[in-house]
Image (spheres, rainbow, N blue to C red):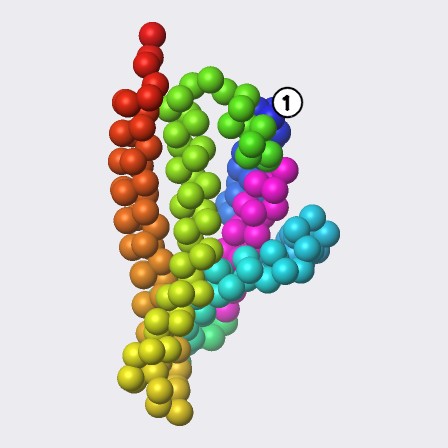
């Protein structure tokens, strides 16, 4: 039962990625509707607090992408001498909407998978390892983001009252990179700990 739910969740997210990430990628209106629908589903299934947490995690990546496209529009860069504003709106807006909707869709599909049941449904110790490690990294990502932002506020340059676009962009980029580094460090250290316990406590036939 739990494996079937996992298979359906994977198939559902794959279908979402295929349909909106390839076939309907350039349809801005469709991408907007897809985002609105998945947002409504997240509110119904996860509640507004968990959905808001998802947005806090997505925000640095979305802002970074938005700033890049804005800079390209302001400098007037576009291929084949095309007008910068309509070109980057047509190119960047659907991808920005897709980024947000895909991350929310992933969280929505994952909510149908019972972690404890899935862990008990398999006797493969190596599969259990990756399930445990995945949960650890997922929790570490959400717990670390607020700490990263708190530490950023302690930097002397962050105490300056006037903060422009450049500061916000650098802060979002720095928090994203810091989050990636923390997750990578946790993956290495926790993975080694789990491997040591498997070698010590689990005897494979």
Residue found at the very far front of the displayed protein: 201
At 58% across and 28% down in the image, what residue appears? Answer: 117
| Residue 147 to residue 44: above or below | below
Query: In the rendered picture of this protein, how many numbered marks are placed on residues?
Result: 1
Dominant secondary structure, magenta: helix
Residue 59, percent from left and from top: 48, 65
| Residue 168 to residue 13: above or below | below
Instruction: Name the quarter where the C terminus is drawn.
Output: top left
Residues rendered magenta in the picture? 87-112
In the picture provided, is 205 more to the left or to the right than 19? left
| Residue 79 to residue 85: above or below | above
Residue found at the very far bottom of the displayed protein: 161
In the picture provided, is 188 more to the left or to the right than 172? left
At 69% across and 48% down in the image, what residue appears? Answer: 45
Q: What residue is shown with label 1?
A: 1
Q: Secondary structure at mark 1?
A: loop
Residue 120, percent from left and from top: 53, 24
The quarter of the displayed image where residue 113 is located: top right
Nearest to the observer: residue 10 or residue 23: 10
Residue 40, percent from left and from top: 70, 55
Q: Residues within 10 Å of mark 1 (few under 14, many from 20)?
A: few
Residue 108 visible (yes or no): yes
At 27% across and 29% down in the image, what residue appears? Answer: 196
Residue 94 visible (yes or no): no
Nearest to the observer: residue 177 or residue 125: 125
- 105 falls in the magenta region: yes
- 162 falls in the magenta region: no
Residue found at the very far top of the displayed protein: 205
Residue 84, percent from left and from top: 42, 74
Instruction: Name the quarter where the N terminus is drawn.
Output: top right
At 35% across and 71% down in the image, what residue appears? Answer: 151
């Amino acid at each position: 039962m739990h494996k079937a739910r996992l298979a359906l969740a994977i198939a559902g997210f794959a279908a979402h990625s295929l349909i909106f990430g390839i076939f309907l990628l350039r349809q801005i209106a469709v991408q907007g509707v897809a985002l609105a629908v998945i947002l409504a589903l997240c509110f119904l299934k996860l509640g507004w607090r968990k959905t808001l947490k998802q947005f806090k995690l997505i925000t640095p990546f979305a802002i970074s992408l938005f700033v890049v496209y804005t800079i390209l529009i302001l400098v007037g860069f576009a291929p084949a001498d095309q007008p910068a504003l309509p070109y980057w709106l047509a190119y960047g807006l659907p991808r920005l909407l897709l980024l947000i909707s895909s991350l929310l869709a992933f969280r929505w599909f994952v909510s149908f998978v019972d972690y404890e049941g899935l862990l008990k449904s398999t006797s493969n110790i190596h599969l259990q390892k990756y399930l445990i490690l995945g949960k650890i990294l997922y929790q570490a990502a959400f717990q670390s983001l607020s700490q990263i932002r708190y530490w950023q506020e302690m930097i002397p340059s962050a105490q300056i009252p006037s903060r422009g676009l450049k500061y916000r962009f650098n802060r979002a980029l720095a928090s994203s990179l810091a989050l990636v580094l923390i997750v990578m460090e946790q993956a290495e250290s926790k993975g080694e700990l789990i491997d040591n316990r498997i070698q010590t406590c689990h005897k494979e036939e």
